[in-house]
Structure formats: structure tokens, C-alpha cells
Image (cartoon, rainbow, N blue to C red):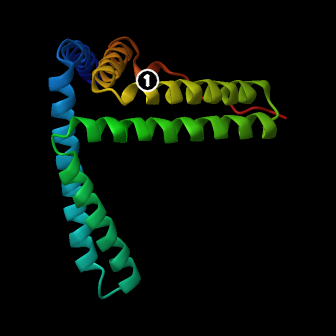
Amino acid sequence: MAENRNVLLGILFIILGILVIAFPLISVFTVSVLAGFAILFLGIWFLAHSFDTWHKSKAASIVNLLLAIFAIIIGIGMFGNILAFSFLASLWLYISGFFLILAGVIGLVTREAKINKGTAVLGIILGIIYLILGIYALDPLYLAIIIGIWLIVDGFALFFVNPLDIPAPEESEE
């Protein structure tokens, strides 16, 4: 059953990836509308949570209220705004790339085993790729291509790789 679900999801992701690449601006607009709705509802949830926690902790309630205001403003601002969505996606890629590079450098300095150093180098390489993609994500057309390629690659991974077949990592003996 799970294997059939992976195949169907893989095919769906591949089709969505092709559609995103074929219709880039419509796709980025659609994703910006969906992301705007999601962030807006997150803000509403923070607002409700703020009222719920007022009697328990006023400080936590104020933090939730500030998060609610911030999320509602971002959600409304991003709703259908392709440039705002591209900017936030690019910012996310920059921040993620920076942290991947930082984690990779720390891993190179602190880890002993060769396989662990390999994953640290992989983190640095992925961080550099994220920084490069962050430059291109500022343009909505390139952002759609990045999203489309990601969907296609993820679709093939779901289609061909069964998560149950992936071996668990072994403990290293030192």
C-alpha cells in the first residue's frame, strides 16, 4: 500500500514539476497565494494562542501576539505578491546556505571519522549551492524553474526509492 502511494506521489510530483516549469509565473503566483494563506492562518493561530495563554503567562502571550501581528502582516503582504514571495524564498535560501556552510565547517573541525568529515564537506557544498540558488530565486522565473526541478527530482526519488529499503546507519566503534 505504501509503495503504491509513493509511486502515485512520485508521478504527481513529476507532473507538477513539469507544469511549474511550463507555466512559471502562474505557478509562482499560485504558490505565493497558498503561502500567503498559510502564513495568514498561522498568524490567526498565534493570535488565538495569545488569548489562550494570557492567564498563564503574560510574557508568552505578548510574544505570541507579536508573532501573530508579524505573521498576519507577512501573510497579507505575500498574498499574490510574486516579488515578495521570491524575496522571502531567496532570503530562506541564503540563511539555509549560511547555516549549512557553518555546520559543515564546524563538522570538519570537530569530527574524527572520515565519513563524518564527508558529510561535513557535503554540507559545505550544499551551502554554497543554496547561496547560488538564492541569487537566482530573486527572479520569479528562475524561482519557478528551481521549484519545478525540485519537484521533478523529488518525484523520481519517491517513484524509485522505497524508504523501507534504505539501511539504517551503523554505529561506529572507536
Residue 21 % position (x, y): 24, 14
Left or right of 90, for residue 46: left
Q: What amino acid does circle 1 point to?
A: Leu
What element does badge 1 sit on? helix
Q: Is residue 11 above or below residue 144?
A: above
Q: Nearer the viewer, residue 113 or 30?
A: 30
Q: Can the viewer see residue 57 in this picture?
A: no
Q: Residue at x 75, y 32 (%)?
A: 172
- Residue at which label 1 appears: 164
Q: Nearer the viewer, residue 170 or 142?
A: 142
Q: Residue at x 36, y 85 (%)?
A: 58
Q: Residue at x 73, y 41 (%)?
A: 106
Which image quadrant for residue 137? top left
Q: Could you tell me how many numbered marks the image carries?
A: 1
Residue 131 % position (x, y): 52, 30
- Outermost residue to the bottom: 55
Q: Is residue 39 above or below residue 53?
A: above
Q: Nearer the viewer, residue 85 or 9?
A: 85
Residue 124 % position (x, y): 64, 29
| Label 1: few (<14), some (14–19) or many (≥20) C-alpha neighbours in 10 Å | few
